[in-house]
Structure formats: C-alpha cells, structure tokens
Image (spheres, grey):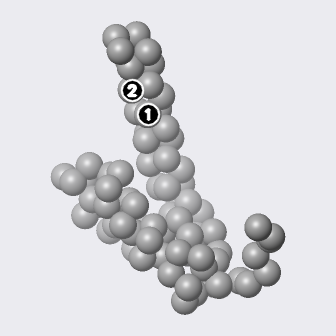
Amino acid sequence: MGVRASPICFGCDKDDETTIHVLMDCPLATQIWIRLVPSNQISNFFLLLIVGTGSSRISIINCMVFRIKNGAQFLWWLAGRYG
C-alpha cells in the first residue's frame, strides 16, 4: 500500500483532508464523536465545535481525546487487575 497523493478526505471522499475536516467536519468523524461523547453532552459538544473557530475547536477536541484516552487506559487497567 502506497502513500495517498490525493488531498481528498478518505472518510467522505468529498472535501480536502485538513486537520479540522478530519477531526470535526467529516461525516465519518461526526459518527465517531456521536459514539464516543456521552449522549447527554453531545449537543453541547457539537455546539462548541460550531461556535468555536480554529484553535478553540482544536482545544475542544484535544480535551475530549484526552478524556477518552484516560478512560480507555483506566478500563484497560481494571481489566488487567480484575479480569
């Protein structure tokens, strides 16, 4: 498998594959966030993404990724301890 030369997003095959697009604007990213963000927080999460711009949007995503990563690490630790 070689390196992709196309700037088009692999997830939606429509828009340019920018960082913002891949993390927030791509329909595939939206479906992933819907599965990862708690259902009682999803509307606020997307509202912040719409209202925020540039670095503030990235800060929101970094915060969510950090929370998800820590949660996954904790679950992995629990599985090893009690599994």
Q: Residue at x 56, y 60 (%)?
A: 58
Query: In the picture shown, does residue 33 fall above or below 79?
Result: below
In the picture provided, is 42 more to the left or to the right than 52?
left
| x, y percent for residue 30 | 39, 69
* Tag 2 near tag 1, CB within 8 Å: yes
Query: In the picture shown, does residue 25 fall above or below 43?
Result: below
Task: Answer yes or no: is residue 58 visible.
Answer: yes
In the picture provided, is 15 more to the left or to the right than 38?
right
| x, y percent for residue 16 | 63, 84
* Residue sitting nearer the eye, 57 or 5: 5
Asked which secondary structure carries label 2, the reply is helix
Disc 1 residue type (three-letter):
Ala
Q: Residue at x 80, y 70 (%)?
A: 2
* Residue sitting nearer the eye, 81 or 70: 81
Furthest toward the top, the residue is: 81
Residue placed under numbered mark 2 in the picture: 75
Binning the other alpha carbons within 10 Å of mark 2 as few (below 14), some (14 to 19) or many (20 upward) gives: few
Q: Quadrant of the N terminus?
A: bottom right
Furthest toward the left, the residue is: 40
Task: Answer yes or no: is residue 74 visible.
Answer: no
Q: Could you give the CA–CA distance between mark 2 and mark 1, rounded to whole angstroms?
A: 5 Å
Q: Quadrant of the C terminus?
A: top left
Residue placed under numbered mark 1 in the picture: 72
The disc placed on residue 32 is none
Disc 2 residue type (three-letter):
Leu
